[in-house]
Amino acid sequence: MTSRITLVFAAFLASGSIALAADGAVTDDAPISAVEAWQLDPQRVFDASEVDLADFQWIARPIVVFADTSADPRFREQIELLAERPDELIGRDVVVIVDTDPGGRSDLRRKLRPRGFMLALLGKDGGVKLRKPFPWDVRELTRSIDKMPLRQQEIRDEKAADG
């Protein structure tokens, strides 16, 4: 479990400095959008300073995790909970975004106005669907997502395509 947390945090800390070139080589001068980066690696955790929520509208459901520091135990627990069942999130087009810098005043922080730790689930339409002042596990999150009208339509479309 500890090694998984370490990997998630290492990916989080390094996410802004490495990109993939068209030939698949790792480089730090091949800029790609946050949506393209998420499509290449749907388990990637984004820093709030790297993304514009408008880019994900109608493409993904952002889960935004706020804390005043990455050392906050609630923040660490939330990241652990999300890392335990990534396939459930990927299947529901979830992108994970974190903001642990209250002094940075990111656009997300200005829009959602967290106080300390906060978990926010946004719909594909960009609207805030859920706010929680404590960590939530993936099972609870996916149940909330599966109740959304757009997700219900996606489920019906998947069933129609299969049968």
Image (cartoon, rainbow, N blue to C red):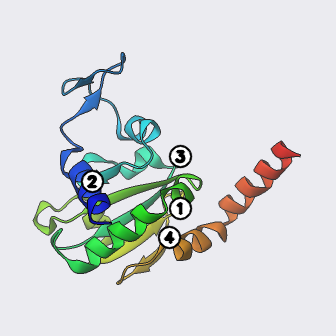
Measured as percent of width and height from the top left, residue 35 is found at: 42, 40
| N-terminal label among 4 and 1 | 1
Q: Amino acid at mark 4?
A: Val
Q: CA distance from mark 2 to mark 4?
A: 19 Å
Q: Position of residue 64 (x, y in %)?
A: 36, 64
> How far apart are the two marked residues, 2 and 3, measured between alpha carbons?
26 Å
Residue contact between numbered discs 2 and 3, judged by CB atoms under 8 Å: no
The disc placed on residue 7 is 2
Q: Which mark is residue 59?
A: 3
Quadrant of the rendered structure where residue 79 is? bottom left
Quickly name the residue at label 1.
Answer: 123
User: Which residue extends farthest top?
Assistant: 23
- Residue drawn at (71%, 53%) of the image: 154
Q: CA distance from mark 2 to mark 1?
A: 27 Å
Crowd band around label 3 with a 10 angstrom C-alpha radius: few (<14), some (14–19), many (20+): some
Separation of marks 3 and 1 at Cα, in angstroms? 10 Å
Looking at the rendered structure, the kind of residue marked 3 is Ile
* Mark drawn on residue 138: 4
**Residue at 85% of width from left, 48% of height from top?**
160
User: Which of the numbered marks, if any, corresponds to residue 53?
Assistant: none
Task: Please give left or right for residue 65 compared with residue 63 in the image.
Answer: left
Q: Position of residue 31 (x, y in %)?
A: 27, 28
The amino acid at mark 1 is: Gly
**Quarter of the image that includes the N terminus:** bottom left
Looking at the image, which residue sits at the far left?
103
Q: Which circle, 4 or 3, is nearer the viewer?
A: 4
The image quarter in which residue 77 lies: bottom left
User: Do we see residue 113 in this rendering?
Assistant: no
